[in-house]
Structures are given as structure tokens and as C-alpha cells.
Image (tube, rainbow, N blue to C red):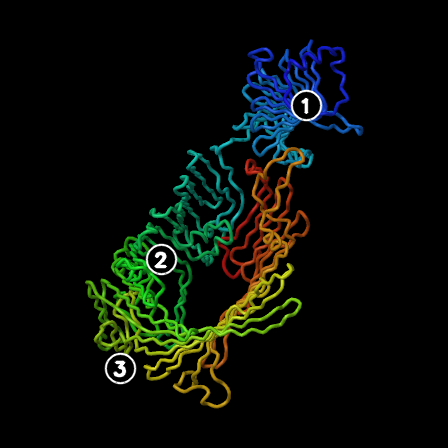
């Protein structure tokens, strides 16, 4: 309650001789003093104060005493303590804690000024001069804590500490701190200390400095970036990512860093993050590296070692750009995702094993717009695909011996331009203002899609207009280096294609209540700028290719219909947990017709003689990227059946059931082409997928060939005609199994909430750094098994193409120790796959991590001990070594 000051003055003046005698009353009282009540000009705003026990006022000396959980509010300043004394003459507030029967100090003063907080044993504050003195203080500055024997605060809000300790550890007795004789804190700016030294676990380190400063800005600030130290077999000892950071404004920053290597190389990079509220956000970086050939530095090297990536000096560049717009209805959207650079740039200059293992990159820049009130939409984009790998070419030499050529190549393709325009599918009834009422005819819908694109690639294919031989020694394509010399050839073989697609939906017709009949008609057309004509060069196996430029038209059309229904079977179990099992069967049959577009009157294909014996081959007359129809007449009936099995089980809640899938999909598919002169029946495809208990996942696919084989070649005779019960021969099988286990993680997900943040024994504040490892989860395990077998027709047995086992997970050994692992085994090649072992130690305010790649081309290790606080991120001990450039096979 609020009590007028004159009442207390009148009441307490009568007992001024006993003014300091603590009354026995335990009622909480609250007093408000206006600025005009006591010496106008000294108090700038209203003072609110209260105490749980009692409040006494000495009218003669003008001193106010607050006992028991006392509290004062004065503008942005607030004070809590077990005892507070206010002297109205000197404008000084004194506060202290009191000791209980055990001698423990209770109710220590807690002083808050704006965003700053101080906790101390005793303190004094002048609310007129805004100066203060604190003994045995602990205060927060950003993410840091300052412990000091004495702290003084001036009217500029600056803090001076004597015999002070600066730390980011939130314990009353911190694990580490920077100990300084004197310390000055400029809130929202920096902490200056000197002389100082670092103390770990109360053990002072031998490293001392005459002075130092630690930035503590409220907003982003510019500053020096401390480099990391390590070693690489290719680059030697290095200092990496040292430089300067500029906070240009609240929307954009700039980071300039450099690397230097003891073997003579260097690296530079520019990075920037930007954002505009309610518009977009993104980041951009450019990295350039120069690496010296490590063999040049090998003393006494007489034979040059074969390195996969380096047998000469190298210069690499890598560009990354990500731009994401904020989605707004009816507004155009510009987006970018660029990840491109020179060949082996990541393999030669990786900082993580995952970066080195990445060999495929895709980039795109696009702008598009669609409106919710209009059926029209468009998009203009540029896409780029880049892959780094090895091409293996096999051929027979003049003596008939098998030879192999292995070549490291970079394939790159760019689609420029890539423009699309679309009209959403609509019913003709809507065109004339009609109303849709659910009739069958309303299911007829028509749309239109147009795509204009030019595919530019350095992989020059046979059909690109270059002469080629039809021999076993012929390469499928030629990879040209991307330079000014080859650009004209690359663009010369980049056709421009315009594709038209007219999707026509005829709706679904319900037959006999339980069957659904769906007719379909399809039409596609392409316009391209190149058309090829082939002719055999006499007395050779070479083919001459003549290219006709202009606008050439390719089209295709087809039609068909499908019929499907659903059959249900339910088995009532009525057990304690299982209530019933339901089996859903979905059979389907369809018919499709496509003309033979390889006939000469269409002009889409040409039969070319490939050797002197008269053998010929049907060859496309148009470049890749054209919507070219298939060859041969197709009049086929497709058939299939899909199965799904579900179980209805009781939950812990009374009368509540849930569905559990036993078999997600089990399907059998095939087709019979009535127009083919042989091999009318297609292969039979079987697929199975299931997931049990949300833990076990299994998928499998198999291909069965119904025809017999003689001497490794198929013959137009069903296998069952040879006798026995073999309906078909298994030609390919692929199986994938995965297992996920993490009971604690699943329990946290089911609770659908994050655990409450920990609070400081000193002061409550939010976490200062991201969690590196969740020590609350005792263990996780992910197992993946993949296997693929294909039948060799000559040996008539299944041959292992690939079989591998992948393992990854984590184990929390103790409350503070955790172990992460990633490994696998290739059963075909009998080799361990990429293996990474990591140990993490939680040191409360610090974290230690050890990463080790023990085998493979990217053997490496790194040891890092660093403070969790982002403010002291450069306070760390790091040691790492990478084996980039290690000869393969060692």
C-alpha cells in the first residue's frame, strides 16, 4: 500500500530516540516518495520502496531504514537487499545482507541499472551523482561476469574494478578467469584490463600481459579475427582464417580473411551476410587458394610421386552465394543458390572431411512470379551442374588386348537461358463463366506449359554433330577443358530448344459404384535449332555427320485409359492390444497407345549403316534435351496390384485406438505390348516397403525376366515353357535396411518441447552459446544396409554390384563425456568406408572436442579446447593435421 510521507514523519518523530530499534511487526509496507516531497532538485523522479518486515524513519537525521526483503525503484535503477538505508541529506543509499544463525550471509544486495546487474556483499549508491561503490561484487557485462573486491561506478555508467576477475563462467567460483589488478568496463563497448593473466582451475598460467581489452558491444562490432593453427601434408604448417571483420551496418557485414602455408601457398577469401527485413536475406563468399607442389620441397626426391590432385602448382577459386526472398502472394521472387568453382578446389583445400567428399554441385539463379488470382505464371532461371570424378574407358588395341584409360574429369553443364511460362489447368466451363457442380464433364481440364532452354556443356556427345566411329574403342563423349580456346566449340554444340506441353485431363468416370475409369490424352512438341543427317564414309567404320541449322519440329502424342478399384479384407482379432488387421488390395489395369515415331515419314530417326557387313543402327536426328518420342509402336496393356496391411491397436488411453502400418506397399507391375513382333511381355517389377515401430525401415525392389536365355542371350520363349515351376528369372534385386534407435531423443520429441534452460547460481541469464552436444541423450544408433545384385547372363548367377553397411551414432559415456562415430564397410571391395571418430568433453563454460579420421585419403585429426562464449571464441587451444595430398594406396 502507498502511505503519505507526512504520516510517517509525524509518527516516527515521536519515537526518534528509538528510531533504529527494529519493531516486531512482520507486515509488508510500501512507501512512495514524490520528487517534491524531499528537497526539490535532488530527486529526479518518483522513488518507490517497500520492505517485508518494517520501515523506520529518523526525522531528525532524515534517514530511512528498510528491514527484511527490502526493495527500491528509482527510474531505471532498482535495488534488493535484506537491509537498505536511505540518507536523504547525503542522497546515499547503503545496502547489505544479514547473517543467519549459521553465519551465512543472506539477502545480498542485488543492484540493477538498465540492463546491468550487480550482486555484492555491501554497496553504496548516490542517486544524485549516480556514483556507487560496491564491495565483493559480481556483475554481468553481456555474456561475461566480473568479480571484484571493490567496484566503483561513475555518472557516465563506467565501472572501475580493483583486484578483478573477468570470466564467462556463470558459477560463483568460476572454472577460469582473467585476473587483473585493475579493470575498467565501458558498458556496451569493451572491458579494459591490465596487467592480467589467465587462471584455470585456480592455477595461474605463466602467460601474462601488460594490458588487454575484450569487446562487449550491444550490437555487432568490427574487429580482428584470430587465425587458427594446424598442419597439412600438402600445405605444411598453416595459419588459417585470420583477418578482419567489418559490421558495415545492421543489415550487412564483411569478413576478409587470409591463409598462409609454410610450403609456399596462400589463400584469401571475402564473405558477406546481408538481410533486409520483410524482403530477403542471403550470404556471399569468394575463396582463392594457391598451393605449391609439395614434391618441390622433398629433399633428395628423384622420382616424382603420383598424387591424385597435385603434381603441379595449383590455383583454385570457389564461389558461394545464397539468396532467399520472403514469400509474398502475388510478388515476384528472386532466389539464388550458387556453389561452383575450379576443379578439385574443395578436395585440395578442404577444412572438413565432408567438404572433401562432395563431388557434385548444383547452382541456380531464378526469378519467377505467380498470382493466386490468375492462372498464369512464369520463371526465368540459369542452372549449372558440376561434377568431379573419374572416367574409365575400356577398349581393345590393335592386338585385340583389353586396355583401360582412366582420366580425372570435371563435367559441367549450364542451361542458359531457361525460361518457363505456364497456364494452370482449367475446365472449359470456367472459360465461359460456368459454375462447377461436380459433373463428370467438369473433370475435363486443359493447361499449357512452355519451356525455352539452351543446354551448354563441355561434354560433347556423339549426337552433338561431331563425327564419330561406331567401334568398341569409341568414347561416349569428349570432355573439353573450359577455357577461351574451347568456348566456341562448346557453344556451337549447344542447341536451343523450345518445349511445349499440353496436359489434358479427361476426368474420372465411376463405373458400377466401385470402379474408376480414367481416360487420358497427351501431346508434347519441341522446336530445336539443329537436326543431324548421317552417312557412312566408304571403306571405313566412321560416320559423317551433317548438321542442318534452322527451326525443326518434333512432336509426340499418345492416349489410353486406366481402370482401378479397392478391395478390403478385415480380420477381427479383439485381443488385449490388437483389435483388428486390415488388408487393402488395389488392382489396376490400363491400356496405352503410341505410334511408331521412328518411321521414315516422321523424320525423327535415321537408320545408319555402321560397318561394311551391313549392320545398321537406329539413331536420333536431334540433340539431347529435345522431347524426342521413343521408337517402335506401342499398344500395350499394363497390369498391377498394390497391397497395404494395417493393424488397429489399443493405446494406453481407455477406448482410444491407433493405426499401425505393417506393410506400407507391396506391389507387382508389368505390361504386355500387343504391337511388338517379339518379347511382348515386359519385365515384372516387385516392390516392398515397410516401417515397423517407427524404428525399422525396409525397402526392396526386384526385377524378374519371364523369358528364357540361351548362351547368355534372351530368346523369344517363356521360361515356364522349359518345364518346371520357374515363372521368371530374377535379374536384379536391391535392398535397403535402416534402423534408428534413440529412446531419450524420441521421448523428448513426444513431449514436443525443449527442456527448460539452466539458471545461474549467481544470476539468472540465458545461454551464451549454442549446444555442441546434447549430453541428456545417453545414446543414439543409426544403421543402414544397402545391397544390389544383378544377374550375369553368361554365368547365369547373381553378381554383387554393391553391398555396404553404414553406422553412425553417439554414446554419452558420463554426464560430461560423449563419443560420436561414423563408419561403414564395403563388402564388395572389402574396405572400410569414410570413418570419423569424435570425443566431446563438457567443461561447463568450456568444451573440448577431438575429431579423428583414421583411414583413407582424408586422414586427419583435430583437437580443440575453447570457451563456449561467442565473446571469447578466440580463447582456445587448437591443434590439427590434414593429409590432403597423401598418395593414394598408402
Q: In the image as oriented, which residue stretches furthest toward the right? A: 101
Q: Nearer the viewer, residue 576 or 77?
A: 576
Q: Which one is in front in this view, the residue at disc 1 or the one at disc 2?
A: 1
Q: Quadrant of the N terminus?
A: top right
Q: Using residue 178 as the reference point, say whether residue 586 is left or right of it.
A: left
Q: CA distance from mark 3 to mark 2?
A: 37 Å
- Few, some or many residues within 10 Å of mark 1 (<14, 14–19, 20+): some
Residue 238 showing in the rendered view? yes
Q: Quadrant of residue 20?
A: top right
Element at label 2? strand
Element at label 1? strand
Q: What residue would you read off at disc 2?
A: 412
Element at label 3? loop
Mark number displayed over residue 614: 3
Q: Quadrant of residue 820?
A: bottom right
Q: Which one is in front in this view, the residue at disc 3 or the one at disc 2?
A: 2
- Relative image position of residue 869 (x, y in whole percent): 57, 38
Q: Nearer the viewer, residue 800 or 207?
A: 800
Q: What residue would you read off at disc 1?
A: 29
- 159 in relation to 785, above or below: above
- 53 in relation to 176, above or below: above
- Few, some or many residues within 10 Å of mark 3 (<14, 14–19, 20+): few
Amino acid at each position: 500500500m502507498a502511505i503519505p510521507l507526512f504520516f510517517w514523519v509525524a509518527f516516527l518523530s515521536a519515537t526518534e530516540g528509538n528510531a533504529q530499534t527494529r519493531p516486531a511487526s512482520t507486515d509488508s509496507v510500501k512507501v512512495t516518495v514524490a520528487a517534491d516531497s524531499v528537497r526539490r532538485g535532488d530527486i529526479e523522479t518518483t522513488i518507490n520502496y517497500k520492505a517485508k518486515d518494517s520501515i523506520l524513519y529518523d526525522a531528525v537525521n532524515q534517514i530511512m531504514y528498510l528491514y527484511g526483503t527490502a526493495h527500491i525503484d528509482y527510474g531505471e535503477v532498482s535495488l534488493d537487499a535484506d537491509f537498505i538505508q536511505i540518507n536523504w541529506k547525503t542522497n546515499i543509499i547503503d545496502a547489505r545482507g544479514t547473517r543467519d544463525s549459521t553465519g551465512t550471509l543472506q539477502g545480498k544486495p542485488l543492484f540493477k541499472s538498465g540492463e546491468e546487474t550487480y550482486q555484492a556483499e555491501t554497496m553504496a549508491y548516490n542517486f544524485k551523482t549516480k556514483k556507487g561503490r560496491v564491495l565483493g561484487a559480481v556483475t554481468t557485462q553481456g555474456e561475461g561476469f566480473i568479480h571484484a573486491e571493490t567496484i566503483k561506478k561513475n555518472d557516465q555508467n563506467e565501472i572501475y574494478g580493483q583486484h578483478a576477475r573477468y570470466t564467462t563462467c556463470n558459477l560463483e567460483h568460476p572454472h577460469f578467469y582473467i585476473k587483473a589488478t585493475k579493470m575498467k568496463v565501458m558498458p556496451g563497448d569493451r572491458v579494459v584490463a591490465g596487467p592480467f593473466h589467465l587462471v584455470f582451475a585456480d592455477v595461474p598460467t605463466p602467460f601474462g600481459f601488460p594490458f588487454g581489452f575484450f569487446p562487449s558491444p550491444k550490437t555487432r562490432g568490427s574487429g580482428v579475427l584470430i587465425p587458427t593453427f594446424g598442419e597439412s601434408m600438402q600445405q605444411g604448417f598453416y595459419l588459417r582464417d585470420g583477418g578482419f571483420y567489418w559490421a558495415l551496418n545492421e543489415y550487412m557485414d564483411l569478413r576478409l580473411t587470409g591463409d598462409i602455408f609454410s610450403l609456399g601457398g596462400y589463400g584469401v577469401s571475402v564473405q558477406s551476410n546481408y538481410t533486409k527485413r520483410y524482403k530477403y536475406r542471403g550470404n556471399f563468399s569468394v575463396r582463392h587458394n594457391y598451393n605449391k607442389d609439395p614434391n618441390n620441397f622433398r629433399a633428395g626426391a628423384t622420382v616424382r610421386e603420383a598424387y591424385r590432385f597435385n603434381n603441379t602448382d595449383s590455383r583454385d577459386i570457389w564461389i558461394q552465394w545464397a539468396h532467399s526472398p520472403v514469400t509474398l502472394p502475388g510478388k515476384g521472387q528472386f532466389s539464388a543458390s550458387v556453389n561452383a568453382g575450379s576443379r578439385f578446389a574443395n578436395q585440395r583445400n578442404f577444412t572438413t572431411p565432408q567438404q572433401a567428399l562432395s563431388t557434385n554441385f548444383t547452382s541456380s539463379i531464378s526469378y519467377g512470379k505467380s498470382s493466386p488470382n490468375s492462372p498464369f505464371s512464369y520463371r526465368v532461371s540459369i542452372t549449372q551442374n558440376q561434377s568431379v570424378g573419374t572416367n574409365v574407358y575400356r577398349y581393345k588395341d590393335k592386338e585385340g588386348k583389353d586396355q583401360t584409360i582412366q582420366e580425372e574429369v570435371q563435367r559441367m553443364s549450364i542451361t542458359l537461358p531457361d525460361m518457363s511460362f505456364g497456364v494452370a489447368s482449367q475446365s472449359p466451363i470456367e472459360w465461359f463463366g460456368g459454375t462447377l457442380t461436380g459433373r463428370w464433364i467438369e473433370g475435363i481440364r486443359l493447361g499449357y506449359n512452355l519451356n525455352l532452354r539452351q543446354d551448354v556443356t563441355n561434354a560433347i556427345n556423339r549426337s552433338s554433330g561431331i563425327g564419330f566411329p561406331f567401334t568398341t574403342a569409341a568414347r561416349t563423349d569428349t570432355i573439353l577443358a573450359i577455357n577461351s580456346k574451347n568456348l566456341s566449340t562448346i557453344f556451337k554444340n549447344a542447341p536451343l530448344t523450345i518445349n511445349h506441353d499440353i496436359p489434358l485431363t479427361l476426368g474420372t468416370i465411376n463405373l458400377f459404384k466401385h470402379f474408376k475409369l480414367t481416360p487420358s490424352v497427351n501431346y508434347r512438341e519441341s522446336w530445336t535449332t539443329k537436326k543431324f543427317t548421317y552417312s557412312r564414309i566408304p571403306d571405313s567404320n566412321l560416320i559423317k555427320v551433317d548438321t542442318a541449322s534452322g527451326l525443326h519440329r518434333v512432336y509426340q502424342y499418345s492416349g489410353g485409359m486406366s481402370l482401378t478399384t479397392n478391395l478390403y479384407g478385415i480380420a477381427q482379432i479383439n485381443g488385449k492390444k490388437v483389435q483388428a488387421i486390415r488388408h487393402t488390395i488395389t488392382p489396376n489395369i490400363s491400356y496405352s497407345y503410341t505410334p511408331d515415331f521412328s518411321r521414315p515419314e516422321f523424320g525423327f530417326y535415321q537408320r545408319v549403316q555402321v560397318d561394311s557387313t551391313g549392320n545398321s543402327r537406329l539413331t536420333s536426328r536431334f540433340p539431347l534435351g529435345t522431347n524426342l518420342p521413343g521408337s517402335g509402336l506401342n499398344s500395350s496393356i499394363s497390369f498391377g496390384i498394390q497391397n497395404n496391411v494395417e493393424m488397429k491397436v489399443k493405446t494406453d488411453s481407455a477406448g482410444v485406438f491407433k493405426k499401425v502400418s505393417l506393410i506400407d506397399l507391396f506391389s507387382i507391375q508389368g505390361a504386355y505390348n500387343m504391337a511388338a513382333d517379339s518379347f511382348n511381355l515386359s519385365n515384372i517389377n516387385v516392390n516392398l516397403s515397410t516401417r515397423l515401430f517407427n524404428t525399422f525401415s525396409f525397402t526392396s525392389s526386384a526385377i524378374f525376366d519371364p523369358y528364357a536365355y540361351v548362351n547368355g542371350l534372351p530368346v523369344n520363349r517363356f521360361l515356364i515353357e522349359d518345364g518346371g515351376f520357374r515363372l521368371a528369372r530374377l535379374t536384379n534385386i536391391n535392398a535397403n535396411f535402416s534402423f534408428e534407435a534413440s529412446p531419450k531423443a524420441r521421448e523428448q520429441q513426444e513431449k514436443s518441447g525443449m527442456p527448460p534452460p539452466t539458471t545461474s547460481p549467481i544470476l539468472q541469464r540465458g545461454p551464451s552459446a549454442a549446444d555442441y552436444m546434447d549430453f541428456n541423450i545417453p545414446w543414439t544408433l543409426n544403421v543402414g544396409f544397402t545391397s544390389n545384385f544383378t544377374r550375369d547372363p553368361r554365368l547365369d548367377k547373381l553378381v554383387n554390384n554393391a553391398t555396404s553397411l553404414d553406422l553412425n551414432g553417439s554414446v554419452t559415456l558420463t554426464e560430461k563425456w560423449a563419443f560420436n562415430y561414423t563408419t561403414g564397410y564395403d563388402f564388395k571391395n572389402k574396405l572400410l568406408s569414410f570413418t570419423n571418430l569424435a570425443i566431446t568433453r563438457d567443461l561447463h563454460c568450456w568444451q573440448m572436442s577431438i575429431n579423428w579420421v583414421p583411414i583413407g585419403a582424408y586422414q586427419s585429426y583435430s583437437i580443440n579446447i575453447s570457451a563456449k562464449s561467442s565473446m571469447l571464441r578466440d580463447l582456445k587451444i587448437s591443434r590439427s593435421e590434414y593429409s590432403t595430398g597423401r598418395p593414394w594406396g598408402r
